[in-house]
Amino acid sequence: MGREQTLAGRLLAEHLVAGRLEPGTEIGLRVDQTLTQDATGTLVMQELEALGLDRARTELSVQYVDHNLLQADEKNAEDHDYLRSACRRFGLWFSKPGNGVSHPTHMERFGVPGKSLAGSDSHTCAAGALGMLAVGVGGLEVALAIAGEPLYLRMPEIWGVRLDNELPPWVSAKDVVLEMLRRHGVSGGRHRIIEYHGPGLACLSAMDRHVIANMGAELGATATVFPADEAIRAFLRAEGREHDFRDLRAGRDASYDIEEEIDLSTVEPLVAKPSSPGNVVPVREASGTPVGQVVIGSSANPGFRDFAVAAATVRGRQTADSVSFDVNPTSRQILVELARSGHLTDLVAAGARVHQAGCLGCIGMGQAPAPGTNSLRTFPRNFPGRSGTADDSVWLCSPETAAVSALTGVLTDPRDYAAEHHLAHPRVTAPARSAADPRVFAAPLPEDEALREELVKGPNVAGLPDFDPLPDEIEGPVLLKAGDDVSTDEISPAGARALPYRSNIPKLAEFTFTRIDEDYPKRAADSPVHFVAAGENYGQGSSREHAAITARYLGLRAVLARSFARIHWQNLVNFGVLPLEFADPDDSEKVRRDDVLCVSGLHRLAETAEFTVRNQTRNEEYRAKHQLSPRQVDVLLAGGRIPQLARALH
């Protein structure tokens, strides 16, 4: 009963509609709320069309516009109009451009302790800061949840992390999650829910917890959970929503599948070096590294405190002339609060460039750094090329480290700067009453009006492609051989060039894998049935299902890897791509690009989990296995979830 006494176990039990809470088995969960953003939401709305949905069947669903904000031409604006019309048609809330990044904005306006949230963004897990069961998944999973279907997951282990003592000056929540990444890397949380508990929580505000919960995605975790305690009550009170508070904590007899402790008093300023969030070292170890850009913002450091601390640090000073100091407010509400408090003036006077509220540089939508320079960011990710610069050098850090480094022009431990300049660590307090204005969100239309609403589709909003069922045999070349930790940014790039085509699969497909092999789309035209081979943790990072659907559009039928990241593995299945794992990991070294592989008997997926893959080029055989549930086997054999549903309806 110990697992059921954990907060994560309690939340899972309250939402369980199928399966048993046994790690490794498939479970189905009731979804109370959904979250979509514009980089993934356009596909979700197209999927709702394909499903023939009349009206959203969740308690609440919200569509945010926070990624594709730059309007260099008409494409992003077309998507925004389409999304607004789809929200009006299907009964969703709509958050217009400039309202802010989905995760902190959802936490401010809509998050409720104890509720479940499925979001088509991997950082949806940030809502766990409020005591929610929040899971990032592919867009089709969210579309199905909006239509009233359960969310299916592999039941995770519950990883309890006890926090003791308090953080020292010039160390903040970002350093805590970087410490977790330093210890465990980018796959340490795979198939786990991380539950933070212990007396150290007393020094972490609701938004501090958001910082840590958000980057659970970087650990590969299914979700992150914090208790809903007095810190959460205070946050909701400031937002005018104390009535949404529900006290939620682990039981006295809680026991965890995995246990760990962090003494907060021993945590020091940390930085993730290029080009992985798991490449973490103490700031002092890299001190003196020249910095050409410093960016503060993103869903990984979204709170008023994060900007106010930076503002207080640079107040009355001037940033180095070699540094572009960029500030991305994470919500319209926080931008207003920074202006009212005077912190915005301090930032601008110190040399900051203040941008609109949104994701921006975090998703490569502007603020691309110069090649050959180091960009220091309070962001969650620094995958190669994600910034929009092909040969980038992005480092991840806390607002404290970012602010002092902007002043010095080199990577600097904030404790050393403070000692040299006799600077006390700023102690800032968020406003007792936030600047929340609910009028900036468009509520769902009444159902009778919604049914008469016409969808607005510009030329760039294309339909979903049709996919055929899985054949009994797949034979074709390995068009791409990749290593470990390949991210979805490398499969389907973000950035200002590709993102505007998120609702146009044929055009977006032209960018597939080009960060790894720029000729892949051209070669795929000559090999309409092919494989990809990869190492560990294939598909880490973003939840974007485009990384599965565009490769499938180009002819990818199977991926053979050592292991898969959770969300991408599910996305592959949803679009009819077979995910197979090497039974002997060493066999992955034997496969080369252009080798012709063949695997047969696939219509027996439900009967056997192991297959023989023949390498016809090298006259070799490899054993491969799958971890599909019976439900997923049915999806895969149909060619994907949408073809499966379409056949069921007809």
Image (tube, rainbow, N blue to C red):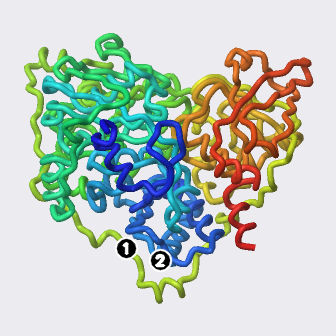
- At 77% across and 36% down in the image, what residue appears? 520
Tell me, for residue 442, which label it has, or none.
1
* x and y, in percent, of residue 646 in the image: 72, 67
Q: Is residue 636 above or below residue 445?
A: above
- At 79% across and 20% down in the image, what residue appears? 591
Residue at the top extreme of this rendering: 285
Q: Is residue 380 above or below residue 550?
A: above
Q: Nearer the viewer, residue 33 or 277?
A: 33
- At 49% across and 37% down in the image, what residue appears? 368
Left or right of residue 144, residue 225 in this image: left
Q: Which residue is mark 2?
A: 88
Report the Cα–Cα distance between label 1 and label 2: 9 Å
Q: Nearer the viewer, residue 307 or 115?
A: 115
The type of residue carrying mark 1 is: Ala
Q: Is residue 503 visible?
A: yes
**Helix, strand or loop for disc 1:** strand
* x and y, in percent, of residue 92 in the image: 44, 71
Quarter of the image where one finds residue 423: top left
Residue at the front extreme of this rendering: 1
Q: Sequence order check: which comes first, mark 1 or mark 2?
A: 2
Tell me, for residue 195, which label it has, or none.
none
Tell me the quarter of the image containing the N terminus.
Answer: top left
* x and y, in percent, of residue 201 in the image: 17, 35
